[in-house]
Image (spheres, grey):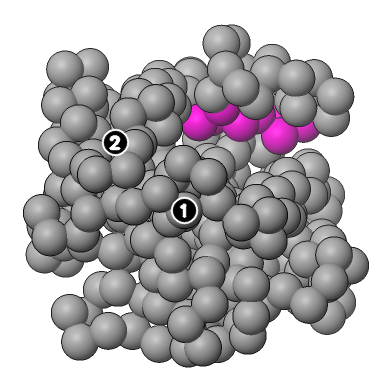
Amino acid sequence: MFRKGQSNIQLKSPAEIVKMRAAGQIVARTLDTLRASVRPGMTTLDLDEIAERSIRDAGAVPSFKGYHGFPGSICASVNEEVVHGIPSAERVLADGDVISIDCGAILDGWHGDSAITVAVGAVPDADLAGMAVCEEAMWQGIAMLRPGNRLGDIGQAIGGYIASQGRYGNVREYGGHGIGTEMHMEPHVLNYAQTSRGIKLVEGMCLAIEPMVNLGSRHVVQLDDGWTVVTQDGKRSSHFEHSVAITAEGPLVLTARAENRDKIADMGLPDPGF
């Protein structure tokens, strides 16, 4: 299960990747439900309750709830909150907000992890542009998940794309990660890199790719609650994530949603089975 010489990196068999896709589908369906539910006037705790019900009704367990004491089934990060926002009955969504929803589920011992950023009502064009840059940066990183490439190729692809799109902040303090029988595993996946270095990617690795793009500076700070990460300058942020398996046929997006079908086909990636 673990690669010889790199004992911390878990490799999955084709049968185990099928199980991870099943967990990923639960996350995907939950995010679809949450996207459809988002509207002005609801609270982030309302969304959390919808997510937990969706995950448990599918026979899975929310992987975030209780993780190092985290109280929610999702991370709900609004506007200047980058990641790890705690769902709250006091946080009411307003028209013009943007919200990052990060969701994880465990099914039969295997994890799925994915995130989307959603516009609440009508939002400024600058926010929509930032969201588009972040999502495409994720896909640029996913495209590098092929046997023989290096870990640094992922960061180069993500960081290079963000830099090419204008004066956006590419958050460096947080990044992607391995995923499998645990939510966070080796290796850590940077969203930037100067050179194509690092471990060689091989079949059976499963990685969560998750850039975070700020409309201003890349710098962030953590609030006193010990979880919520916000932009240092108070400007808004976007966050997208997919869990992906490295296969001989190319990157298999384990948390693919129906709306990703055309993108996956255009990129020539393996059909995850929608």
Residue shown at 27% from the left, 84% from the top: 223
Q: Nearer the viewer, residue 69 or 250?
A: 69
Q: Of helix, strand and loop, which one carries label 1?
A: loop
Identified at 34% across, 52% down, the residue is 94
Would residue 259 be found to the left or right of residue 45 on screen? right
The percent coordinates of residue 244 (x first, y second) are 59, 38
> At which x and y percent is residue 201?
72, 52
Does the magenta segment cover residue 250?
A: yes
Magenta stretch: give its range. Answer: 247-256
Tally of numbered tags: 2
User: Does residue 187 appear to the left or right of 57 in the view shown?
Assistant: right
Q: Which image quadrant is residue 160 in? A: bottom right
Residue toward you, 54 or 132 = 132
Q: Is residue 123 magenta?
A: no
Residue positioned most to the top: 273
Q: CA distance from mark 2 to mark 1?
A: 29 Å
Q: Residue at x 12, y 60 (%)?
A: 90
Q: Which residue is mark 1?
A: 96
Specify the amino acid type for callout 1.
Gly
The answer to whether residue 117 of the structure is visible from this angle is no
Q: Which mark is residue 105?
A: 2
